[in-house]
Image (cartoon, rainbow, N blue to C red):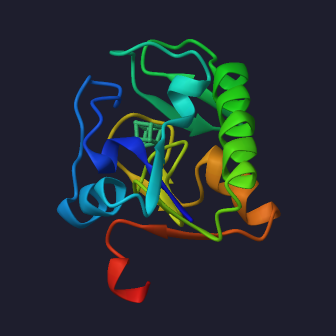
Amino acid sequence: MIVVSACLAGVECRYNGQAFPVPAIVEMVKRGQAIPICPELLGNLPIPRPSGERRAGRIVSRDGEDVTAEYEYGAKTALSIVKLVNADKVILKSKSPTCGCGQIYDGSFSGNLIPGDGIFVELLKENNIAVYNEDQLDEL
Ligand code: SF4
């Protein structure tokens, strides 16, 4: 089984209330080959919500609130779903403070990218689960 970021499957769960649908991923879900999850919603964060970025080991929202606890709770809950369905790979939205793999925003809310992983991706890697983003579908 494959788990995917819900926003890539067309669910309007991003901070701005929009989706980021990728047709091949939407089809995987429609065919029952993938399960969509959104760790930030699992952390009880609302739609819409201020965007968040990782900064100095914490996650802060654009309006300055420390939302680390909500993001951590959502990431742990999402990991439990990945384990429950015995997913062997996960396809997640790039650059997100939760789902980003290898590259995330630098915490200044100025659009600068730095090497790093989202908080959910960190947990997945600790559990030896393969993580891809929407630009790596050819590698699957
Ligand atoms: S947490 Fe992940 S699935 Fe949810 S909106 Fe952000 S990138 Fe998409």
Quick check: 103 above or below 36? below
> Residue 14: x percent and y percent?
34, 31
> Residue 82: x percent and y percent?
67, 52
Q: Looking at the image, which is closer to me, 137 or 66?
A: 137
Determine the residue positioned at 49% across, 54% down: 100
Determine the residue positioned at 27% across, 30% down: 12
Residue 24 makes an appearance in the image: yes
Q: Looking at the image, which is closer to me, 15 or 27?
A: 27
Question: Left of 14 or right of it: where is 4?
Answer: right
Question: Left of 44 or right of it: where is 58?
Answer: right
Residue 32 falls in which quadrant of the image? bottom left
Determine the residue positioned at 65% across, 45% down: 119
Determine the residue positioned at 57% across, 65% down: 1
Can you say which quadrant of the picture contains the C terminus? bottom left
Residue 71 falls in which quadrant of the image? top right
Q: Looking at the image, which is closer to me, 131 or 108?
A: 131
* Extreme residue toward the front, this view: 31
Residue 56 makes an appearance in the image: no
* Extreme residue toward the bottom, this view: 139
Question: Left of 27 or right of it: where is 80?
Answer: right
Label tally: 0
Q: Looking at the image, which is closer to me, 50 or 12?
A: 12
* Extreme residue toward the left, this view: 23
> Residue 6: x percent and y percent?
40, 42
Quick check: 109 above or below 98? above
> Quick check: which quadrant has ligand 1?
top left
